[in-house]
Amino acid sequence: MFLALASFLLFGVAVAQDNVPAGHKLLMEQFDNIKPGDIKASKVTGLLEVSFDGTLLYATKDGRYLIQGDAYDVLKKVNVTEEGRAIARAEALTNADPDTMVVFDVADGKPDYTVTVFTDIDCGYCRKLHREIQAYTDLGIRVQYMFFPRSGPNTPSWTKANNVWCADDRAAALTNAKAGLDAPANDCGPTPVETHYKLGLAAGVTGTPAIMTETGVLIAGYVPAPELRERLDEIAATAP
Protein backbone atom coordinates (compact mmCIF):
# COMPACT_ATOMS: atom_id res chain seq x y z
CA MET A 1 0.00 0.00 0.00
CA PHE A 2 2.81 2.39 0.78
CA LEU A 3 4.20 2.04 -2.74
CA ALA A 4 0.79 2.84 -4.20
CA LEU A 5 0.55 5.80 -1.89
CA ALA A 6 3.98 7.09 -2.80
CA SER A 7 3.17 6.90 -6.51
CA PHE A 8 0.07 9.00 -5.86
CA LEU A 9 1.98 11.83 -4.19
CA LEU A 10 4.37 14.43 -5.52
CA PHE A 11 7.56 15.39 -3.76
CA GLY A 12 9.54 18.54 -3.20
CA VAL A 13 6.85 21.18 -2.75
CA ALA A 14 7.86 24.27 -0.80
CA VAL A 15 6.00 25.01 2.42
CA ALA A 16 5.69 28.61 3.47
CA GLN A 17 3.50 28.33 6.57
CA ASP A 18 4.75 30.09 9.66
CA ASN A 19 4.35 28.67 13.13
CA VAL A 20 4.23 25.12 11.80
CA PRO A 21 6.18 22.57 13.87
CA ALA A 22 9.35 21.46 12.16
CA GLY A 23 8.22 17.85 11.86
CA HIS A 24 4.93 18.87 10.27
CA LYS A 25 6.73 21.18 7.88
CA LEU A 26 9.13 18.45 6.79
CA LEU A 27 6.25 16.10 5.97
CA MET A 28 4.43 18.79 3.98
CA GLU A 29 7.60 19.61 2.07
CA GLN A 30 8.09 15.97 1.11
CA PHE A 31 4.48 15.05 0.28
CA ASP A 32 2.39 17.34 -1.86
CA ASN A 33 -0.98 16.03 -0.68
CA ILE A 34 -0.38 16.66 3.03
CA LYS A 35 -1.98 19.78 4.50
CA PRO A 36 -1.65 21.08 8.07
CA GLY A 37 -5.01 19.54 9.02
CA ASP A 38 -3.80 16.10 7.92
CA ILE A 39 -1.23 15.89 10.73
CA LYS A 40 -2.19 15.59 14.37
CA ALA A 41 -1.06 14.04 17.61
CA SER A 42 -1.65 10.32 17.76
CA LYS A 43 -3.23 8.29 20.53
CA VAL A 44 0.08 6.44 20.44
CA THR A 45 2.38 8.41 22.72
CA GLY A 46 5.26 10.11 20.95
CA LEU A 47 3.97 9.72 17.40
CA LEU A 48 2.10 11.86 14.89
CA GLU A 49 -0.88 10.61 12.91
CA VAL A 50 -0.75 11.44 9.19
CA SER A 51 -3.73 11.06 6.86
CA PHE A 52 -3.28 10.60 3.10
CA ASP A 53 -6.81 10.77 1.62
CA GLY A 54 -8.04 7.87 3.73
CA THR A 55 -4.74 6.08 4.37
CA LEU A 56 -3.38 6.46 7.90
CA LEU A 57 0.32 6.34 8.75
CA TYR A 58 2.33 7.29 11.81
CA ALA A 59 5.36 9.56 11.86
CA THR A 60 7.99 10.49 14.41
CA LYS A 61 7.52 13.97 15.79
CA ASP A 62 10.49 15.27 13.80
CA GLY A 63 8.81 14.07 10.58
CA ARG A 64 11.85 12.02 9.61
CA TYR A 65 10.37 8.54 9.77
CA LEU A 66 7.03 7.19 8.56
CA ILE A 67 5.62 4.03 10.13
CA GLN A 68 3.12 1.75 8.43
CA GLY A 69 1.14 -0.68 10.56
CA ASP A 70 -1.63 -1.05 13.11
CA ALA A 71 -1.49 0.00 16.76
CA TYR A 72 -3.62 -1.84 19.31
CA ASP A 73 -4.74 -0.59 22.71
CA VAL A 74 -4.21 -3.68 24.86
CA LEU A 75 -6.31 -2.30 27.72
CA LYS A 76 -9.35 -1.32 25.66
CA LYS A 77 -8.74 -4.18 23.20
CA VAL A 78 -9.34 -2.01 20.16
CA ASN A 79 -7.42 -1.30 16.98
CA VAL A 80 -6.83 2.42 17.35
CA THR A 81 -5.33 2.63 13.86
CA GLU A 82 -8.51 1.27 12.27
CA GLU A 83 -10.54 3.80 14.24
CA GLY A 84 -8.33 6.53 12.79
CA ARG A 85 -8.57 5.06 9.29
CA ALA A 86 -12.36 5.19 9.47
CA ILE A 87 -12.25 8.88 10.33
CA ALA A 88 -9.79 9.54 7.48
CA ARG A 89 -11.90 7.55 5.00
CA ALA A 90 -15.04 9.43 6.01
CA GLU A 91 -13.25 12.75 5.45
CA ALA A 92 -11.97 11.56 2.06
CA LEU A 93 -15.46 10.51 1.00
CA THR A 94 -16.88 13.91 1.93
CA ASN A 95 -14.43 15.38 -0.61
CA ALA A 96 -15.63 13.02 -3.35
CA ASP A 97 -18.14 14.55 -5.73
CA PRO A 98 -21.47 12.63 -5.59
CA ASP A 99 -22.15 13.74 -9.14
CA THR A 100 -19.29 11.49 -10.30
CA MET A 101 -20.93 8.39 -8.79
CA VAL A 102 -23.61 6.06 -10.16
CA VAL A 103 -26.36 6.09 -7.55
CA PHE A 104 -29.17 3.64 -6.82
CA ASP A 105 -31.48 5.36 -4.36
CA VAL A 106 -34.35 4.26 -2.15
CA ALA A 107 -37.85 4.81 -3.49
CA ASP A 108 -38.67 7.91 -1.44
CA GLY A 109 -35.19 9.43 -1.69
CA LYS A 110 -34.81 9.31 2.10
CA PRO A 111 -32.42 6.47 2.90
CA ASP A 112 -31.68 5.25 6.40
CA TYR A 113 -28.08 4.67 5.31
CA THR A 114 -25.84 5.53 2.38
CA VAL A 115 -22.94 3.29 1.44
CA THR A 116 -20.23 3.93 -1.12
CA VAL A 117 -19.26 0.79 -3.02
CA PHE A 118 -16.00 0.58 -4.95
CA THR A 119 -16.89 -1.74 -7.80
CA ASP A 120 -15.27 -3.57 -10.72
CA ILE A 121 -17.61 -4.36 -13.62
CA ASP A 122 -15.89 -7.71 -14.22
CA CYS A 123 -15.82 -8.78 -10.54
CA GLY A 124 -18.08 -11.77 -9.87
CA TYR A 125 -19.13 -10.75 -6.37
CA CYS A 126 -19.70 -7.17 -7.56
CA ARG A 127 -22.12 -8.58 -10.08
CA LYS A 128 -23.79 -10.70 -7.41
CA LEU A 129 -24.23 -7.60 -5.21
CA HIS A 130 -25.72 -5.64 -8.08
CA ARG A 131 -28.19 -8.38 -8.98
CA GLU A 132 -29.65 -7.74 -5.51
CA ILE A 133 -29.57 -3.92 -5.73
CA GLN A 134 -33.36 -3.72 -5.28
CA ALA A 135 -33.07 -5.64 -2.00
CA TYR A 136 -30.57 -3.08 -0.64
CA THR A 137 -32.70 -0.10 -1.58
CA ASP A 138 -35.86 -1.80 -0.25
CA LEU A 139 -34.09 -2.05 3.12
CA GLY A 140 -33.40 1.68 3.17
CA ILE A 141 -29.83 1.58 1.87
CA ARG A 142 -28.75 3.99 -0.86
CA VAL A 143 -25.88 2.54 -2.90
CA GLN A 144 -23.50 4.93 -4.61
CA TYR A 145 -20.93 3.29 -6.83
CA MET A 146 -17.38 4.44 -7.46
CA PHE A 147 -15.30 2.77 -10.18
CA PHE A 148 -12.40 0.55 -9.14
CA PRO A 149 -11.21 -1.60 -12.07
CA ARG A 150 -8.84 -3.93 -10.23
CA SER A 151 -6.76 -4.58 -13.35
CA GLY A 152 -5.76 -0.91 -13.47
CA PRO A 153 -5.46 1.59 -16.32
CA ASN A 154 -5.42 0.60 -19.99
CA THR A 155 -7.26 -2.67 -19.43
CA PRO A 156 -10.65 -3.93 -20.66
CA SER A 157 -12.25 -3.40 -17.24
CA TRP A 158 -11.05 0.21 -17.19
CA THR A 159 -12.45 0.79 -20.68
CA LYS A 160 -15.80 -0.67 -19.66
CA ALA A 161 -15.96 1.72 -16.71
CA ASN A 162 -15.22 4.67 -18.99
CA ASN A 163 -17.92 3.54 -21.42
CA VAL A 164 -20.48 3.21 -18.63
CA TRP A 165 -19.73 6.74 -17.49
CA CYS A 166 -20.13 8.06 -21.04
CA ALA A 167 -23.52 6.36 -21.54
CA ASP A 168 -26.67 8.48 -21.65
CA ASP A 169 -28.20 6.39 -18.85
CA ARG A 170 -25.32 5.44 -16.56
CA ALA A 171 -27.39 3.38 -14.13
CA ALA A 172 -28.83 1.26 -16.95
CA ALA A 173 -25.41 0.97 -18.60
CA LEU A 174 -23.84 -0.22 -15.34
CA THR A 175 -26.60 -2.78 -14.83
CA ASN A 176 -26.17 -4.08 -18.38
CA ALA A 177 -22.37 -4.17 -18.08
CA LYS A 178 -22.60 -6.20 -14.88
CA ALA A 179 -24.88 -8.60 -16.78
CA GLY A 180 -22.17 -9.05 -19.40
CA LEU A 181 -23.45 -6.57 -21.98
CA ASP A 182 -20.75 -4.03 -22.74
CA ALA A 183 -21.72 -0.38 -22.98
CA PRO A 184 -21.08 1.03 -26.47
CA ALA A 185 -17.71 2.72 -26.86
CA ASN A 186 -18.09 6.44 -26.46
CA ASP A 187 -15.50 9.12 -25.80
CA CYS A 188 -17.17 11.82 -23.71
CA GLY A 189 -13.95 13.42 -22.52
CA PRO A 190 -12.47 13.05 -19.02
CA THR A 191 -14.21 10.53 -16.77
CA PRO A 192 -13.99 10.06 -12.97
CA VAL A 193 -12.60 6.53 -13.23
CA GLU A 194 -8.99 7.50 -12.49
CA THR A 195 -10.00 9.74 -9.58
CA HIS A 196 -12.15 6.98 -8.08
CA TYR A 197 -9.40 4.42 -8.54
CA LYS A 198 -6.76 6.58 -6.84
CA LEU A 199 -9.10 7.38 -3.97
CA GLY A 200 -9.79 3.69 -3.50
CA LEU A 201 -6.07 2.87 -3.41
CA ALA A 202 -5.39 5.63 -0.90
CA ALA A 203 -8.32 4.47 1.26
CA GLY A 204 -6.96 0.92 1.43
CA VAL A 205 -9.19 -0.81 -1.11
CA THR A 206 -7.48 -4.01 -2.25
CA GLY A 207 -10.46 -5.96 -3.58
CA THR A 208 -14.01 -5.49 -4.73
CA PRO A 209 -16.70 -4.96 -3.81
CA ALA A 210 -15.48 -2.67 -1.03
CA ILE A 211 -18.31 -1.11 0.95
CA MET A 212 -17.70 2.07 2.93
CA THR A 213 -20.14 3.53 5.40
CA GLU A 214 -20.67 7.25 5.89
CA THR A 215 -18.51 7.00 9.02
CA GLY A 216 -15.65 5.47 7.04
CA VAL A 217 -15.98 1.87 8.21
CA LEU A 218 -14.71 -0.46 5.47
CA ILE A 219 -16.70 -3.65 4.88
CA ALA A 220 -14.75 -5.86 2.50
CA GLY A 221 -16.53 -8.13 0.05
CA TYR A 222 -20.09 -9.03 -0.82
CA VAL A 223 -22.60 -8.84 2.02
CA PRO A 224 -26.25 -9.86 1.48
CA ALA A 225 -28.75 -7.04 1.92
CA PRO A 226 -30.30 -8.20 5.24
CA GLU A 227 -26.86 -8.78 6.77
CA LEU A 228 -25.60 -5.41 5.56
CA ARG A 229 -28.62 -3.70 7.11
CA GLU A 230 -27.88 -5.46 10.43
CA ARG A 231 -24.23 -4.41 10.31
CA LEU A 232 -25.13 -0.82 9.53
CA ASP A 233 -27.56 -0.81 12.46
CA GLU A 234 -24.81 -2.18 14.74
CA ILE A 235 -22.29 0.40 13.54
CA ALA A 236 -24.79 3.21 14.10
CA ALA A 237 -25.63 1.92 17.58
CA THR A 238 -21.98 1.87 18.67
CA ALA A 239 -20.92 5.14 17.03
CA PRO A 240 -19.60 7.82 19.41
Image: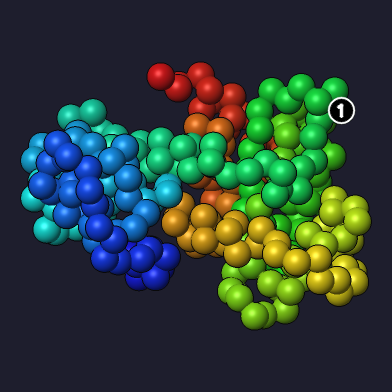
Q: Quadrant of residue 194?
A: bottom right
Kindly tell me whether residue 172 is visible in this rendering: no
* Residue located at (23% from left, 28% from top): 76
**Is 25 placed left or right of 219 in the picture?**
left
Name above or below for residue 134 compared with residue 174.
above
**Is 137 placed left or right of 69 in the picture?**
right
Q: Position of residue 110 (x, y in %)?
A: 76, 22
Q: Position of residue 101 (x, y in %)?
A: 71, 48
Q: Quadrant of the C terminus?
A: top left
Kindly tell me whether residue 237 is visible in this rendering: yes
Q: Quadrant of residue 71?
A: top left
Q: Which kind of residue does numbered mark 1 sit on?
A: Ala
Name above or below for residue 108 compared with residue 131.
above
* Residue located at (38% from left, 63% from top): 9
Disc 1 crowd, CA 10 A, few/some/many (<14, 14-19, 20+): few
Q: Quadrant of the N terminus?
A: bottom left
72 or 153, nearer to the observer: 153
Q: Position of residue 161 (x, y in %)?
A: 74, 66
Judging by the rendered image, the residue that carries numbered circle 1 is 107
SS under mark 1: loop
Q: Position of residue 142 (x, y in %)?
A: 73, 34
* Residue located at (59% from left, 57% from top): 196
**Is 147 placed left or right of 240 in the picture?**
right
**Is 191 placed left or right of 118 in the picture?**
right
Name above or below for residue 70 compared with residue 108.
below
